[in-house]
Amino acid sequence: MGGVFRALEADGDVAMKTYSGAELVNIGSGEDITIAEFARVVAEVVCYSGEIAFDASRPAGTPRKLLDVSRLAKLGWRAVTLLHDGLKCANEAYRQAIE
């Protein structure tokens, strides 16, 4: 499987193996991050050194994204992989897949 799945398994992904409900379950850290900060983390992981520009004349939508991970927490699972590390793992898996 790809890097993201390995990262989840490395975190002890017991919750997803035992969940049988019909409702969606968000997988995330439960920590808030701005879109700008997320873009900077992605740029660092993929070694992008160019400018990150935001068009202030366009509708911005929600400037922050925060998943509700309460269902996941009730299943006893919590993220232990840092965002940077998870993105790095996913990027490495992607790069291997395209070689």
Image (tube, grey):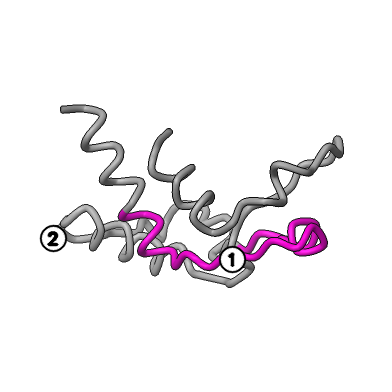
Front residue of this view, candidates 57 and 70: 70
Mark 1 or mark 2, whichever is nearer to me: 1
* Residues at marks 1 and 2 touching, judged by CB atoms closer than 8 Å: no
Q: Residue at x 13, y 60 (%)?
A: 49
Q: In which quarter of the image is the N terminus?
A: top left
Name the side, left or right, on which 56 lies relative to 64: left
Q: Where is residue 8 in the image (x, y as percent from the top left)?
A: 53, 51
Q: Residue at x 23, y 63 (%)?
A: 44
Q: What residue type is labelled 2?
A: Ser
Q: Is mark 2 on a helix, strand or loop?
A: loop
Q: Give the range drawn in magenta.
A: 66-88
Residue 15, how many percent across, how many down? Answer: 72, 51
In reply to whether residue 71 is colored magenta, the answer given is yes
Q: Is residue 37 above or below residue 58?
A: below
Where does label 2 land, which residue?
Answer: 49
Residue 91 in the image, given as x and y percentages of width and height: 29, 46
- Chain-order first, disc 1 or disc 2: 1
Q: How far apart are marks 1 and 2 (CA)?
A: 27 Å
Q: Mark 1 points at which residue?
A: 29
